[in-house]
Amino acid sequence: MLKGKTALVTGSTSGIGLAIARALAAQGANVIINGFGDKAEIEKLRAGMEKEFSVKAIYSPADMSKPAEIAAMVKEAENNFGAVDVLVNNAGIQHVANIENFPPEKWDAVIAINLSSSFHTIRAAVPGMKKRKWGRIVNIASAHGLVASGQKVAYVAAKHGLVGLTKVVAIETANDGITCNAICPGWVLTPLVQAQIEARAKVSGKSVDAEKIALLSEKQPMHQFTTPENIGALAVFLSSDAAASITGSAYSIDGGWTAQ
Ligand code: NAD
């Protein structure tokens, strides 16, 4: 379905981003993966995708908190593949603390990586999409892009901002063959959430498994995690021709979290 297209997925060395990059590659897209981690592990992931899906894959170590590195990453993608057709803004971090204890540098980092990086990638990629009259932008927001929880002031502000950014870009590109949508997952068991579960278990003295259930049942009517692959499949759908008129939407995939 995406043969001959190029997909850039930020934060795709782990978790949801990795599953999205793999899902797009499985549809024939060449991919640019990005994110931090062990060099040898990342090379294994990159080479593995090329072999498994018969596509080209390159890795960019660009730091999503650094606008100059983001611009260089998009340029590198266009130089290597001629285009960025599908842009998935997924890189994200979390910090949990009451507002009066929230370190300002953590606020800056969460806003930079979870919100501003998408402004910079989209700004760099849209001119090429407009020229080719085709583009798909998928922003990985969160249930926290639609509703709030305590102790997550920067994350909730960034994700609400990302949903707003999605709508503006959708309006501005509506007649250019480009769509821009947000995906709003509930709980997905990735390293980002595992760290939160382990921190809860440390405080409560309960087991990690007990805290997993507690975490789910506090927010979601459905007591199971969404999988990274579920989100990859939704990103593929939003990149398809069947989704050509879906733009400016925020898709919940959250076990009923925001239905309440
Ligand atoms: P993760 O920690 O498994 O992966 C995050 C990825 O972002 C990694 O590849 C990491 O290297 C990369 N990254 C972090 N800082 C970066 C930086 N400065 N520059 C470049 N890359 C950077 O987390 P995840 O759970 O897969 O989260 C992916 C996205 O999904 C995030 O935006 C997160 O907010 C969102 N999300 C996650 C959940 C969940 O329950 N896990 C729910 C809703 C939304």
Image (cartoon, grey):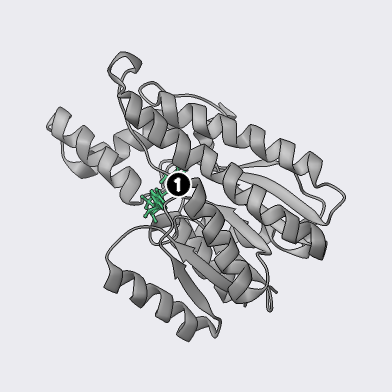
Give the residue number, with chain letter if any, for mark 1.
66
Foreground pick, 184 / 107: 107
Q: Quadrant of residue 3?
A: bottom right
> As drawn, which residue projects farthest toward the right?
175
Q: Position of residue 41 (x, y in %)?
A: 30, 71
Residue in view at x 76 percent, y 43 percent: 170
Mark 1: few, some, or many residues within 10 Å (few <14, many ≥20)? some
Residue 145's image quarter? top right
- Judging depth in this view, the residue of 113 and 212 nearest the camera is 113
Q: Nearer the viewer, residue 156 or 190?
A: 156
Q: Residue at x 34, y 77 (%)?
A: 44
- Left or right of residue 141, residue 38 in this image: left
Q: Within 8 Å of ligand 1, the CB of disc 1? A: yes
The answer to whether one can see residue 254 in this image is no
Q: Quadrant of the N terminus?
A: bottom right
Helix, strand or loop under label 1: loop
Picture residue at 53% right of the left edge, 82% below the top: 53
Residue 126 appears left or right of 49: right
What residue is rendered at 59% in x and 63% in y? 75
Query: Is residue 25 visible from the viewing direction of this image?
Result: yes
259 is higher (above) or lower (below) than 51 = above
Q: Is residue 110 above or below residue 6?
A: above
Give the image location of residue 30, x and y in percent.
58, 75
- The vertical placement of 45 against 137, above or below, is below
- The part of the image, by quadrant, that contains residue 42 is bottom left
Tell me the amino acid under the disc marked 1. Answer: Lys
Which residue is at the front of the view, 205 or 158?
A: 158
